[in-house]
Image: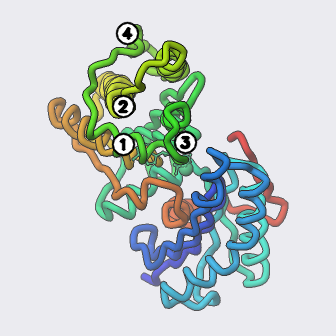
Amino acid sequence: MKDVLILGIESSCDETSAAVVKNGRECLSNVIASQIDIHRRYGGVVPEIAGRNHLLAVMPVIDEALEKAGVKKEELDAVAVTYGAGLIGCLLVGVSAAKAFAYALGKPLVKVNHIEGHIAANLIAFPTLEPPFLSLVASGGHTSIIEVRDNCTFVPVSATMDDAIGEAFDKVARILGLPYPGGPEIDRRAKAGNANIKFCPNLHTRGDHAYSFSGLKTAVVNYVHNLKQKGERIPVDDICASFTAEAVGYLVDTFISAAEERGITKAALAGGVAANSYLRAHLADACAKKGVTLFVPPPVLCTDNAAMIAARGYYSFVSGKDIADLSLNAVSNL
Ligand code: KG4
Ligand code: ZN
């Protein structure tokens, strides 16, 4: 059978990325231009600045992805692009570039949901992994449990009712004066701390497995404000360790309970927060205890990248689904 080569394009937040993926599983290139250094001075992503920088980066990143893959653009079978969810001005750059590229080459255009893309990172990391499995998507914008029935059928089980887990990590880091993005910084600082503070004793798994992180986030913020008002020392490492333990414990317990309820024995972690060392270890432990086989992609495939978009796009392309035309628009809230 002829190989299928998909060019993936991702620009939903602050990473401009392009990748070439073969047969949905083999990553030939995955070029990521991160804007982290640009947004760090503002303490978070500034959407207008991000959009403008995507515009500067998108064509060089696509050229580099093709060159690294050793693939000529005429050899591509389709172009897959993230069309949502994400920052609208950022998504529009990737969508416009993908439309122009597909039109100029006369190739099909495939629209990809960013969250489903995150899950598909597992298909690249584990080429023999096949659905059904239950996925925990923990990212800056989403915290969801999703049942993957086949490579094109993603059934939402639950989501967060308020903040995403990554948002909570970034907000806690900000209040502690740690640089953006806060997640990796908290991960690092937590290793030196003791998880001896209980911020939110009422955190518990709900019957519908929906998450809520705003209470925990606010409890940490109040704790820090209180110490500041009293002029006391802020135990940054202990706060990082305690917050991480509480957030991750809650994330994992809820996910395991959803898996048990469904009798699921295969699980896959996804999203930027999946790069968190404590989450990776704790979920692996919990899954092992319950006889659930866990798949966790390497950190570079957890945070935003285009290889995951190309992998997800491959399955739509070969089954003739989600083929878009030039009327495709970006959707900030899918
Ligand atoms: O999936 P992602 O790259 O972008 C979205 O689609 O949102 O996730 C970004 C999020 C940020 O909140 C970042 O702080 C968090 O992932 N993150 C981490 C770690 N690495 C990235 N959070 C905790 N620990 C990490 N090591
Ligand atoms: Zn993402």
Question: CA separation, marks 2 and 3?
Answer: 15 Å
Judge the density around disc 2: few (<14), some (14-19), many (≥20) Cα neighbours within 10 Å. Answer: many
Question: CA separation, marks 1 and 4?
Answer: 22 Å
Q: Which mark is residue 201?
A: 4
- Residue type at mark 2 is Thr
Residue 212 visible in the current orientation: no
On the image, numbered disc 2 is attached to which residue? 244
Give x and y (percent) for residue 249.
Answer: 32, 26
Question: CB under 8 Å between callouts 2 and 1?
Answer: yes
Q: Secondary structure at mark 1?
A: helix
Question: CA separation, marks 2 and 1?
Answer: 8 Å
Q: Which mark is residue 42?
A: none
Give x and y (percent) for residue 4.
Answer: 50, 78
Question: CA separation, marks 3 and 4?
Answer: 24 Å
What residue is drawn where x is 47% and y is 77%?
29
Of marks 3 and 4, which one's residue comes earlier in the chain? Answer: 3
Question: CB under 8 Å between callouts 2 and 3?
Answer: no
Of marks 3 and 1, which one's residue comes earlier in the chain? Answer: 3
Of marks 2 and 1, which one's residue comes earlier in the chain? Answer: 1
Image quarter of the N terminus: bottom left
Between label 3 and label 1, give the one nearer the viewer: 1
Residue 21 placement, left or right of 334: left
Judge the density around disc 4: few (<14), some (14-19), many (≥20) Cα neighbours within 10 Å. Answer: few
On the image, numbered disc 3 is attached to which residue? 140
- Residue lying farthest to the top in this orientation: 202
- Residue type at mark 3 is Gly
Does mark 1's beta carbon lie closer than 8 Å to ligand 1? yes
Towards the viewer: 250 or 209: 250
On the image, numbered disc 1 is attached to which residue? 187
- Residue type at mark 1 is Asp
Vertically, is 205 above or below 301? above
